[in-house]
Image: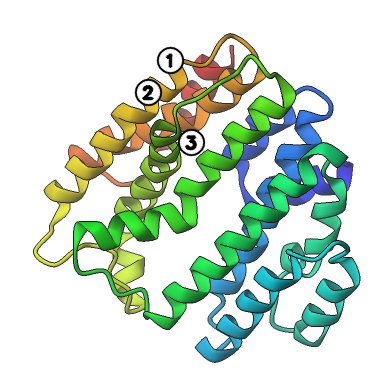
Amino acid sequence: MSEALNMLKQTSRTFYIPISRLDPGLKEAVTGAYLCMRSIDEIEDRPELDDPTKTKLLYSIRDILHTANPTAALQELLAPYKGNLPEVTLRLHEWIELCPAGTVEIVCRYTSRMAGEMAEWVDKQWRIETEQDLDGYTYSVAGMVGEMLSELWAWDDQEIQTDRDKAVAFGRGLQAVNILRNRKEDLERGVDFYPNGWGKEEMLRYTRRNLQLADEYVAELKQGPALQFCKLPLALAHATVKLIGAGGNKLSRADVLSIVSRATG
């Protein structure tokens, strides 16, 4: 578990803090789930891989994760790409094995779906023309993460029942913040996630609308690990949107530390 947490710390300091504070069992499940999805995301983002290779790998992972014992097949699939893929992806099978028995099916099901849908977006060249396209993309890469987390909360505590649309909005809102924040870099690499005719104001409205639903999602969670987990990334998202709306872009380290202290105190 310590190796997985170290990997988590390397890939996302935002999620490392709330995940590391979860109770045993749920901590392993959410760590494994996050690293599985990060593994898939790294394939989609990898500049060293051409698009046909990305889709081949993603569709293969989608299919392998439907099988009863995916470990050997995943290792065999990814081994030839050792020089082109990061460690988090090459160890995908380990993150699945980290998940408690009752959560493996949940994590594999969502990781499989994400891999398949990301492959479709590679095929489409990430072409987003309408708000419906944007909804589809943000669902594929983040909205379904909200759904998966809700299933993991319910696995840990059957009293936790969440609204699916609000769970999706939680993930979608966080992704929309990333799209706003990374606008310049995305355009430089030739990717435009804004629908036709949209500027910053339209994307801010879209983001705020989803974050409002995310607030409702979190407000409906009872006191416990799920609530504690969700508070920090949502607080950081709101602060970032406020900053971008005022003409800034990136929270200072002092701002982040202050938000972390308030959200986890």
Q: For the residue marked with disc 1, what is the amino acid?
A: Ala
Q: Quadrant of residue 129?
A: bottom left
- Which residue is located at x 85 percent, y 61 percent? 68
Residue 232, horizontal then vertical, whole percent: 52, 27
Q: Position of residue 122 (x, y in %)?
A: 45, 78
* Residue lying furthest left: 197
Q: Nearer the viewer, mark 3 or mark 1?
A: 1
Cα distance, mark 1 to mark 2?
6 Å
Reply above or below: 218 against 191.
above
In this rendering, position of residue 73 left or right of residue 239: right
Along the line of sight, which residue is nearer the eye, 111 or 192? 111
Q: Amino acid at mark 3?
A: Arg
- Cβ–Cβ below 8 Å for labels 1 and 2? yes
Let me know if residue 257 appears in the view: no
Q: Residue at x 81, y 47 (%)?
A: 4
Which residue in the protein does label 1 denote? 219
Lower position in the chain sequence, tag 2 or tag 3? 2
Which residue position is annotated with label 2? 215
- Mark 3: give few (<14), some (14-19) or many (20+) Cα within 10 Å: few
Give the residue number, with chain letter if any, for mark 3. 253
Q: Nearer the viewer, residue 243 or 145?
A: 145
Which of these two is toward me, 24 or 191?
Answer: 24
Q: Quadrant of residue 49?
A: bottom right
Quadrant in which the N terminus is drawn: top right
